Image (spheres, rainbow, N blue to C red):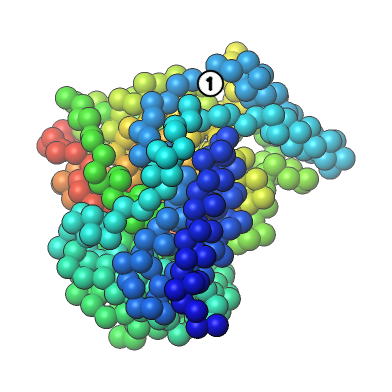
């Protein structure tokens, strides 16, 4: 109605009400749901700030919600303790028992009964994540890292592109250490997300998706000034942009973004700033934990081919119809190869040792890199059920499913977690809170960065790409640069056979800058570039 000052006051009051609701949220899950449900408040306030040409206000509005629960956890810097509440412990044991039965039960009717039991048990399983702070302190936690503070932490060769999808048009905040500007995009959320779905579907079919990728480039990147002058892109995605591999897009000259830019992703500018400013405890000798060669025959005798790409209809393994897990024969050599490439002190869990219980029993806070090569299963309807599939343990009762709700409580302090597994980068999009998936769970647990996959990976090609990636890491390259160079090496080696399906899905989320550590000179055999 043109009453901009009044609208601004109302939006500020609405955001304060949401903050008050978040203070009383008993768990991260409920906090995320509140932000997701009320995301339109932040979108409206952002659009108003853009209309008033207030770039700083626009940034702070959207950052107040984006990645909020993760940012709050990073601020708290809580020390994760084992869950000892009797109700919670009992609920977890029941969940393990039900899910073990689901993994073996193939009859739809019996599975339906088990799924109902699982849902009922999950309602009890609502851990309270640490003591509540005072009301004022909790409200202060919700404040975004200021635009100026973020700019101080952006490197000279980096540009942050923070997207906000809306109707009838979308926006992008371009932020460098020297400047910040809001750009309007020529299309709205619906058109962009439809194009992302089409692009990923074409990649799934083994195509280069040149036309659709070109359209996305023209909408998402071409309207922006100055981004191409930097060699590193940090993407803060919105909506289905969370599953778009930006480095695979082609510019009008036919060159992929990969060829000129190292690309990484962050849930928000606030999360990026907190990751970069958090203290790092350096181990005297860098340590590597590798997990792979899981014996899936202990879980299911059936073997099914999973869809090789992200799609909203990707079947949930804890759904009405059962599915097994095929052997990943190349993961043993993958773990051994990357371990040799680093030449670090290591702990390897392979074959019969690759169980959920064995992983949980490790001193996880002591490892600088954790690499897990296994099946990964997303869950769109129940994000906390998303899991890395390891082997069960009869002695402990663990079902072998290392799920997001369990991962968040692991005491991880790694500089890098590598999930060489299918579908670890996809999940349920929860408004401005972001995407709920396995990579986010590891960031919540304390990882500085996570390398994940947006779709099912080719076993052989993934192992080769990982070996190249670690070879570049061992040379002291930054994480995002090491991934860029590993992909380029593969494209040069395999030529036209290296279609985007094989390499584009691997992305780094969190802080992709800087080497993992001041790396010692590797002592083992080096992989070929």
Task: Estimate the x, y position of residue 525 in percent, counting from the top left.
Answer: 20, 38
In this orientation, which residue lies closer to the viewer: 54 or 157? 54
In this orientation, which residue lies closer to the viewer: 29 or 41? 41
Task: Estimate the x, y position of residue 317 in percent, counting from the top left.
Answer: 67, 44
Query: On the rendered structure, is 71 left or right of 513?
Result: right
What is the residue that sits farthest to the right in this orientation? 109
Quarter of the image with the C terminus is: bottom left
Q: Is residue 211 above or below residue 104?
A: below
Q: Secondary structure at mark 1?
A: loop
Q: Quadrant of residue 112?
A: top right
Dot 1 corresponds to which residue? 83
Query: On the rendered structure, is 42 left or right of 488?
Result: right
Residue 288 visible in the picture: no
Q: Quadrant of residue 312?
A: bottom right
Q: Is residue 327 above or below residue 154?
A: above
User: Residue at 53% across / 59% down in the picture?
Assistant: 14
Dot 1 surroundings within 10 Å: few (below 14), some, or many (20 or more)?
some
Count all numbered tags in the image, as a single digit. 1
User: Residue at 59% across / 42% down in the picture?
Assistant: 30
Q: Is residue 180 above or below residue 92?
A: below
User: Residue at 36% across / 53% down in the picture?
Assistant: 144
């Amino acid at each position: 109605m043109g009453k901009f000052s009044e609208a601004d006051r109302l939006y500020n009051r609405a955001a304060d009400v949401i903050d008050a609701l978040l203070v009383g949220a008993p768990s991260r899950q409920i906090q995320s749901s509140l932000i997701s449900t009320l995301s339109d408040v932040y979108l409206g306030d952002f659009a108003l700030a853009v209309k008033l040409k207030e770039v700083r206000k626009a940034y702070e509005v959207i950052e107040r919600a984006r990645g909020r629960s993760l940012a709050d956890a990073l601020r708290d810097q809580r020390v994760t303790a084992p869950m000892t509440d009797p109700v919670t412990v009992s609920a977890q044991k029941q969940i393990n028992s039900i899910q073990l039965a689901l993994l073996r039960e193939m009859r739809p009717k019996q599975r339906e009964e088990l799924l109902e039991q699982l849902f009922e048990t999950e309602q009890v399983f609502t851990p309270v994540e640490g003591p509540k702070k005072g009301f004022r302190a909790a409200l202060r936690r919700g404040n975004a890292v200021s635009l100026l503070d973020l700019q101080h932490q952006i490197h000279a060769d980096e540009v942050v592109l923070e997207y906000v999808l809306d109707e009838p048009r979308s926006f992008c905040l371009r932020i460098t250490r020297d400047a910040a500007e809001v750009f309007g995009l020529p299309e709205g959320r619906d058109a962009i997300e439809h194009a992302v779905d089409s692009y990923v579907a074409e990649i799934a079919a083994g195509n280069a998706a040149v036309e659709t990728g070109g359209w996305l480039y023209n909408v998402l990147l071409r309207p922006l000034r100055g981004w191409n002058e930097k060699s590193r892109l940090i993407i803060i995605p919105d909506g289905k942009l969370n599953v778009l591999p930006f480095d695979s897009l082609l510019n009008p000259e036919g060159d992929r973004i990969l060829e000129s830019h190292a690309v990484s992703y962050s849930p928000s500018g606030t999360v990026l700033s907190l990751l970069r400013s958090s203290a790092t405890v350096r181990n005297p000798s860098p340590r590597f934990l590798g997990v792979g060669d899981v014996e899936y025959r202990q879980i299911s005798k059936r073997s099914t081919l999973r869809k090789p790409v992200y799609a909203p209809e990707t079947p949930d393994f804890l759904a009405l119809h059962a599915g097994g897990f095929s052997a990943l024969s190349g993961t043993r050599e993958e773990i051994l190869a990357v371990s040799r490439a680093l030449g670090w002190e290591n702990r390897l869990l392979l074959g019969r040792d690759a169980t959920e219980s064995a992983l949980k029993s490790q001193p996880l806070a002591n490892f600088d890199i954790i690499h897990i090569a296994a099946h990964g299963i997303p869950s769109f309807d129940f994000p906390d059920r998303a899991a890395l599939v390891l082997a069960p343990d009869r002695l402990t009762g663990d079902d072998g499913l290392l799920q997001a709700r369990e991962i968040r409580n692991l005491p991880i302090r790694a500089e890098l977690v590598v999930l060489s597994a299918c579908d670890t980068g996809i999940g349920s999009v929860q408004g401005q809170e972001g995407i709920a998936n396995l990579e986010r769970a590891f960031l919540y647990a304390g990882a500085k960065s996570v390398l994940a996959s947006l779709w099912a990976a080719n076993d052989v090609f993934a192992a080769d790409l990982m070996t190249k990636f670690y070879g570049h890491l061992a040379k002291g390259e930054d994480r995002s640069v090491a991934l860029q160079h590993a992909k380029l090496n593969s494209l040069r080696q395999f030529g036209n056979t290296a279609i985007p399906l094989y390499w584009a899905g691997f992305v780094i989320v969190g802080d992709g800058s800087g080497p993992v550590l001041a790396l010692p000179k590797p002592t083992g055999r080096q992989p070929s570039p």
